[in-house]
Image (spheres, rainbow, N blue to C red):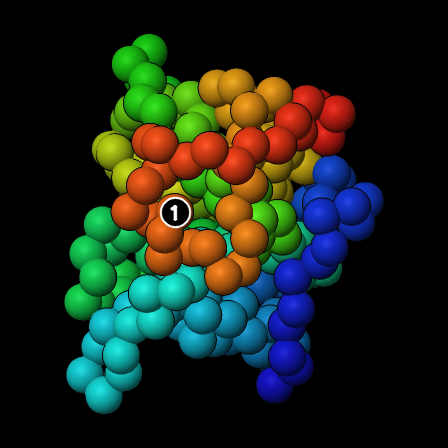
């Protein structure tokens, strides 16, 4: 299988709308292999404490990936809906996902992205959403998500439509700047983090 690599933050493909996937295309061997590669990326980068595998507290956990984050311009994402649970995975492949309803109630959560690993910050998202999509076999599925799983899926659907989490920061002029060796400290001190960066010039 190919080794997928996240696109650089300034890659224009991150700002493009991804193409819908047809059922005939979905059922091809090539497309299924591509989906396996996306799954392997999330599982391999997941950094969760599992039997025989220790968690590295010095780096964040990957809980979702949209295809265009690694240069595949299709409406496919992988999400780990056990985002709030460290001991196991609940990986879902969503093809052509659409958010069909959003609650008016919102939440602020700290987000980051595998394409912009040094920038973190609180976003404003709907607390509850309903989503319609296909699974990898082309079956229609519907999900109602609340809290962290809802935030995660909104993040990934934004990617598929050419938006980044920085577009939804509560304060883009004061995002958190977290260098690679600082994640463990940041995890413990998010609310008091002093290193800031203005990303307002990057948002859309």
Question: Residue 57 location, x and y as percent?
Answer: 32, 65
Q: How many labels does the image show?
A: 1
Which of the two residues, 5 or 201, is positioned nearer the viewer here? 201
Which of the two residues, 146 or 181, is positioned nearer the viewer here? 181
Q: Is residue 61 left or right of residue 21?
A: left
Q: Regarding mark 1 in the picture, which secondary structure is present there? A: helix
**Residue drawn at point x = 62 percent, y = 32 percent:** 197
Q: Is residue 153 left or right of residue 55?
A: right
Which of the two residues, 30 or 121, is positioned nearer the viewer here? 121
Q: Which corner quadrant of the image does residue 58 belong to? A: bottom left
From this viewpoint, which residue is outermost toward the top? 104
**Residue drawn at point x = 39 percent, y = 42 percent:** 152
Name the quadrant of the C terminus.
top right
Q: Can residue 181 be seen in this view?
A: yes
Question: Residue 5 location, x and y as percent?
Answer: 66, 68
Question: Residue 56 location, x and y as percent?
Answer: 34, 71
Question: Residue 137 location, x and y as percent?
Answer: 44, 64
**Residue density around tag 1, few if under 14, some if 14–19, many if 20 or more, within 10 Å:** many
Q: Which corner quadrant of the image does residue 150 belong to? A: top left
Name the quadrant of the N terminus.
bottom right
Residue that label 1 marks = 186
Answer above or below: position of 134 versus 145.
below
**Residue drawn at point x = 22 percent, y = 77 percent:** 50
Q: Is residue 140 visible?
A: no
From this viewpoint, which residue is outermost toward the right? 12
Which of the two residues, 148 or 100, is positioned nearer the viewer here? 148
Q: Is residue 112 left or right of residue 126?
A: right
**Residue drawn at point x = 57 percent, y = 49 percent:** 118
């Amino acid at each position: 299988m190919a080794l997928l690599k996240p696109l650089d933050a300034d890659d224009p493909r991150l700002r493009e709308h991804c193409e819908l996937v047809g059922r005939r295309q979905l059922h091809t061997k090539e497309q299924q292999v591509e989906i396996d590669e996306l799954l392997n990326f999330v599982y391999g980068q997941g950094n969760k404490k599992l039997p025989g595998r220790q968690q590295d507290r010095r780096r964040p956990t990957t809980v979702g990936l949209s295809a265009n984050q690694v240069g595949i311009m299709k409406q496919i994402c992988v999400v780990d809906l056990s985002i709030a649970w460290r001991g196991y995975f609940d990986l879902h492949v969503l093809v052509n996902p659409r958010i069909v309803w959003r609650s008016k109630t919102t939440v602020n959560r700290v987000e980051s992205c595998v394409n912009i690993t040094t920038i973190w910050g609180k976003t404003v998202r709907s607390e509850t959403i309903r989503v319609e999509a296909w699974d990898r076999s082309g079956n229609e599925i519907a999900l109602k998500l609340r809290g962290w799983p809802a935030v995660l899926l909104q993040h990934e659907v934004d990617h598929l439509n050419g938006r980044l989490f920085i577009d939804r920061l509560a304060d883009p002029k004061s995002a958190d700047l977290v260098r690679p060796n600082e994640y463990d400290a940041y995890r413990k001190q998010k609310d008091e983090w002093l290193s800031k960066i203005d990303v307002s010039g990057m948002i859309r």
